[in-house]
Image (cartoon, grey):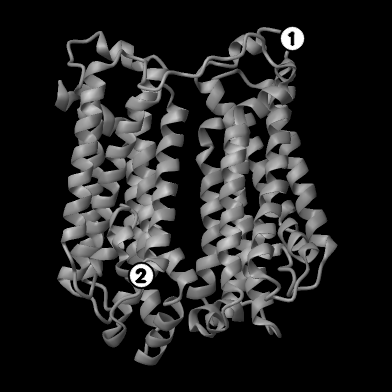
Amino acid sequence: MLFRYIRLIIKRERINSLVWLLGIAGLMIGFAPLFSNLFGTPQEMAAIAATMNTPAMIAMVGPVYGLHAISSAMVMSQMSLLLFVIAIACMNIFFVVRHTRADEELGRMEVLRSLPIGRLTSTLATLTSAVSLNIKITVVSAIGLMFMPMDGITVAGAWVYSAALGAAGIFFAALALLMAQVFSTARGATTGAMATMSALFLLRAVGDAYVDGNWLSWLSVMGLPMQTYAFYQNRLLPIVVMLAVAAVLAAIALLLCKRRDLGEGLVPARKGAGEASPLLLSPLGFAWRMLRGSFIGWAIALFSFGAMYGVSLGMDDFFEIDMLQDMLATMGDIPNMAQGFVGMLLMMMGLLSVVPVMIAVKRVWGEEKHHRLESLYARAVPRWKMMAAFMTMGVLFSIVMPALNALGMYLASQGAANLSLGQFILGGLSYLPAIWVMLGLCVLLVGWAPKLGWIAWAVFGISFFFNYMGRLMFPQDVAEFTQRFTPFGWIPQLPVDDFAWLPLIVLTGIAAALSTVGLIGYRRRDIKL
């Protein structure tokens, strides 16, 4: 039965797993040539390594090593490995929680348990499937990197780099499995795993940047992949430690799963209030209740991101990085590099702010799929009001998230960019029309064809690629042209560009039209069609 259960998971995850595999391994392999093009000479590589060898940059990307024998492969490892670790951690957390605690919460596990399967079958099958997916990512990434025409690439380095990523993924799969036993809801398990990842990230940042010997980083699994010193010393011990810790966590999770009751967790679900809040008497209050946890989490994350990047504005050597200068060159003639960097950061954070907005709107479809809205619509609750309530929450997210990011950037920069708080906030909020276009696209898809919701994520991916990677990969005129295919490419990048009303008005009109058509569709179509 274990192998049949694994086949069931593979069938359910065939699309998601393929997307994650191609996304992580493909980006890793696709990024490699960029580092050779951007840092082609030893002088350029030494300059970027010296710039990264500061507490603020080390806290963001990890330790710097091998300065006396720096290569493009080592620069790639130092600059990108931590980002891929975060990506594969999120993948494993979502994967494991979806097939364990979420299935219990939705009643699927009760049906499966009625079959002749053991108590640990579902848990073992989920863990095995997650480990298999991480191994596939490791193998594909290593083989791809081995054949990259890049200075410093070695067979051992490619396998160590990829194995460090895969081992980190297996650790977070085991961690998510443990959280699924500890908490009694899928949201609690996901939040617990994400909070642990954040704590490990902070522990690693402090250990790498401020503790001699990096001994504190060895206590953080987020720090162990960087301790492999890929393409330099190729240490295997951090990988072994990650796998050993993952085995311990998995064993504890299996023990808890064997002893606990189905649907229960080590931490019982918090009992609700005796009487419902007056806010729940309206669709808007209901939407806030469903999304407040996401609101708080994203608000903290975006404020923290802004603060981390704001610190770099006060580093003079930071603006001597050729890669950064190449990216800023796509913005035209910039008299002030710091202000140009602020404009680029605000654009990137505007793109990132789209994610919680899209999640807020698409939450309607998630509740609908799980048949939680039927009891509400059976009462005097118009469907368009429910959709409008979640749209309103999306608009709230779109305003608060860029503003908090700009505030964090301003406070951490300590005036290095010679910009006022109002200029930071205005630059962040200038992307509202582009964010609203993405919101309107989500409303349109949920209203008329919710199963095609992946189109919105595809548009987001294209926007991210053209507005970020396009600056590095294409000449200035080509980069500017491709950015016009996305709503973000039409926004003037304050404080460098002059403010312009016309593109903002046009984008807002498009967003309003998409949202209106989506509302009409949601009111007319059948529920859970």
Q: Quadrant of residue 527?
A: top right
Residue tagged by mark 2?
63
Residue 44, disc: none
Residue 380, disc: 1
* Mark 2 or 1, closer to the camera: 2
Q: Quadrant of the N terminus?
A: top left
From what the image shows, is residue 410 above or below residue 283?
A: below
- Is residue 136 left or right of 505 when viewed as pictured? left
Q: Quadrant of the C terminus?
A: top right
Give me the residue at 39% from left, 37% from top. Answer: 94
- Looking at this view, is 474 or 160 the one in front? 160
Q: Is residue 528 visible?
A: yes
Counting from the top left corner in percent of width and height, residue 291 is at 61, 32
Q: Is residue 434 visible?
A: no
Counting from the top left corner in percent of width and height, residue 201 is at 41, 54
Counting from the top left corner in percent of width and height, residue 204 is at 38, 58
Distance of label 2 from label 1 (alpha carbons): 59 Å
Amino acid carrying label 2: it is Pro
